Image (tube, rainbow, N blue to C red):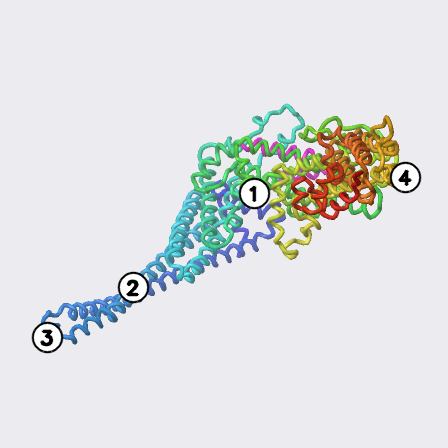
Amino acid sequence: MDYEHSFQTLPVSNTLSSSVLSFLNDKFRARTDLAGAPALVSELRTRCSDLDRTLTDLNRSLGASLVAYASFSDRFDAVFDDLSAKLIRLRSSTCSPTSSFSDGGGEGNGKAEKILGEELPALAKEVARVETVRIYAETALKLDTLVGDIEDAVSSVMNKNLKKHSSTQNSDEMRLLAIKTLKMTEEVLTSVTKTRPKWARLVSAVDHRVDRALAVLRPQAIADHRALLASLGWPPPLSTLTSSNPDRKSAEVPNPLFTMQGDLKHQYCENFLALCRLQQLQSQRKYRQLEGFNRKVALRQPLWAIEELVNPISLASQLHFSKWVDKPEFIFALVYKITKDYVDSMDELLQPLVDEAMLVGYSCREEWISAMVTSLSTYLAKEMFPVYVGQLDEESATGIRSQARISWLHLVDLMISFDKRVRSLVEHSGILLSFQEDGNLQKISSLSVFCDRPDWLDLWAEIELSEALDKLKPEMDDERNWRMKVQGAVLSSVPEDFKSPAVSSAFLRHLSSMIDRCRSLPSISLRSRFLRLGGAPITRKFLDCILQRCQEAEGLTALTDDDAIIKVANSINAAHYFESVIKEWCEDVFFLEMELNQGDQLGLSGSEYGSCEEPIKGSEGGIFDVEIGKLGEFRAQWVEKISVVILRGFDAQSRDYMKNRRQWQEKGEEGWTVSKSLVVALDYLQGKVLVVEESLNRIDFVRVWRSLAAGVDRLVFQNILMSNVKFYDGGVERFDSDLQVLFGVFGAWCLRPEGFFPKASEGLKLLKMGEKQLQDSMAGGEKWMKDNGIRHLSVTETEKIVRSRVFKS
């Protein structure tokens, strides 16, 4: 065959359709490609012959269907004839003269009952069956006709795109006809699915043929749309967008969507509308086919027409991205500028077309922004993060500190800043709430790269933690930060003065910074994971630090000197302030959402997590619940230790006073309101408590002095009242005076200090009672004790105190 002669008969280029031109330009990019022309011609002829053969098969199938329909019609005629005969016989048997029933008596009644009870229901069932068969046949024929029309239209569209002089308008008309027929078919299938669920095999057979047609129609529609975009000059040249002139306005950038005019604009709008209708039809089919499944997840797809706008821009942008590997800020600036420059055209030109296509729940502005952000996230995940991960692995292997961590943090900073700018762009349209409600915030976040790679999130949290601890180390080592107090509640709205050292504020600042950085993450589970890996360890480091200082103070002097007590009190203040601030933070909606989300995930088994998404150990409950609990335990433990140390010292100082049994048989020293041997112990107690009051926060100080009061009460009760001493009148007066002075030591912090010495107070009350009243107590038991206000002593203890009272006759 003379191929050169066949080439000479080709028409001029302006007579060829745009799709044919695009096809030829793609196949013959260089002169050397002409050598493959014979093979291409052979391939095209083979495809044409295959299509012709397919068309012949379709015609043959249509003829067979018509013959089958004719056969069905003949069978229906026979069935209806038989049915008419049965109805005539039924009428003749039920309309006989009344006399026959009266003459026949029971025989006539029995015949009527048989007709009404057996033959009539059977006949009705047969009529219903015949009607169902008729409806099935009509529906099958209708669907076969519709599907045949669809296949003819699709075949016509394909043939017209391959022919030399095909009209673009005719091709678009055939595509619209195919989509219209597809819609009619889907309406019939939806009706059948709802009203005739047993006809599933018919629906499945039709779906199979429609899917084959769509598998041809959609790629062709997208290919035509791409060719039309290319003829419009899309994507626009990015050289103007990457201009270094900061004063250049977005309005000066040419927008092909706004500059197209006349027939070209009409053609683009029709093509865009057809693609939207095709997607809307596809959504309807999926909605019907996914009956009983999670439709919301499966049905939500990006807008095809917007994707076709973004894809060529994304490819063109990546040529610039490859030059800016060391300057990622240029990448984010370019993507944001493109997104912002063309977002208005989405609202003004394309949104009305989407609404006309009845694509419910789609916003062109939203789809444009999310598609641009997705393209950026894809590039970061494929090209940038793997490089940084490799550098970090190399750093771990060699032990040599590199710039990888700094580069990683810089890239994350850019992503957070970019997401905030995009969020403001979305807020301008008023659709941010829909994103949050639908859980689709990751569509407009470049940080969504961590959704698919939680191992990268773990690495980010590790880097953030390492940087924070490196910055905190010099602040922890600076002793001035432990002496200087936080002025007021800097990071908390609680007006309480915790007397906390400045180092606690430093820890909270770094923790707050980490919390703020993770707020941009588009998933609640990612935020929770990031804070558990990066934020909680900061709290544990703080707890280890103050615990170490307390242990050092205890190890040196056993907390016997004032400096050691002050050092421990500072650590308790720091823990209390830190705990209060974190508790207040955890009441915010940001943390409550994470706690609820964690509760929803507790039922997941380990196999339901991916290899990189294993649940973190101890992740039950709130983010900082474990750390808050440990801080509370630390405070309680060391408050108790301070109380025990002071109480032990008081016990040592008052030992002579406690062991002096004879003093309760005589009056106190002349001119003294308190026993001389108790003065030193009370002075020690008051001095230590004043030191604690000066250095410890108010709330924990209350716990200290109350614990001390309870301990002193036990000492006095056990060593004096329960030691079998004899109390004379003078001894009772002396004991009363000593207790009043003891109560006065604690009177500065409460109105009724005797209430915190219940056993000593009630013991003194018994000793001050008269002889007759005490004799009644021996017989009255618990009732007498209750009547006389003795509630903290047992009967045995009361009897022992009563026996220790001696009255002179």
Please, what is the three-letter code of the amino acid marked with disc 1? Gly
Disc number at residue 248? none
Is residue 398 at all visible to an observer of this figure? yes
Which residue carries the number 3 mark? 103
- In this rendering, which labeled residue sits more in front, label 1 or label 2? 1
Residues drawn in magenta: 315-343
Please, what is the three-letter code of the amino acid marked with disc 2? Ala
- In this rendering, which labeled residue sits more in front, label 4 or label 3? 4
Q: Reading the chain from its start, which is encountered first: label 1 or label 3?
A: 3
State which quadrant residue 492 falls in.
top right
Q: Reading the chain from its start, which is encountered first: label 4 or label 3?
A: 3
Residue 221 at x, y = what percent?
49, 46
Q: Secondary structure at mark 2?
A: helix
Q: Reading the chain from its start, which is encountered first: label 1 or label 4?
A: 1
Which residue carries the number 1 mark? 439
Residue 776 at x, y = what percent?
69, 43
Q: Reading the chain from its start, which is encountered first: label 4 or label 2?
A: 2
Residue 331 is inside the magenta segment:
yes
Label 1, label 2: how far apart the Cα atoms are? 50 Å
Along the viewing direction, whichever of 494 and 537 lies nearer the viewer: 494
Q: Reading the chain from its start, which is encountered first: label 1 or label 2?
A: 2
Which residue carries the number 2 mark? 128
Please, what is the three-letter code of the amino acid marked with disc 4? Leu
Q: Does the CB distance between marks 4 and 2 fall below 8 Å?
A: no
Q: Is disc 2 surrounded by few (<14), some (14 to 19) or many (20+) residues within 10 Å? A: few
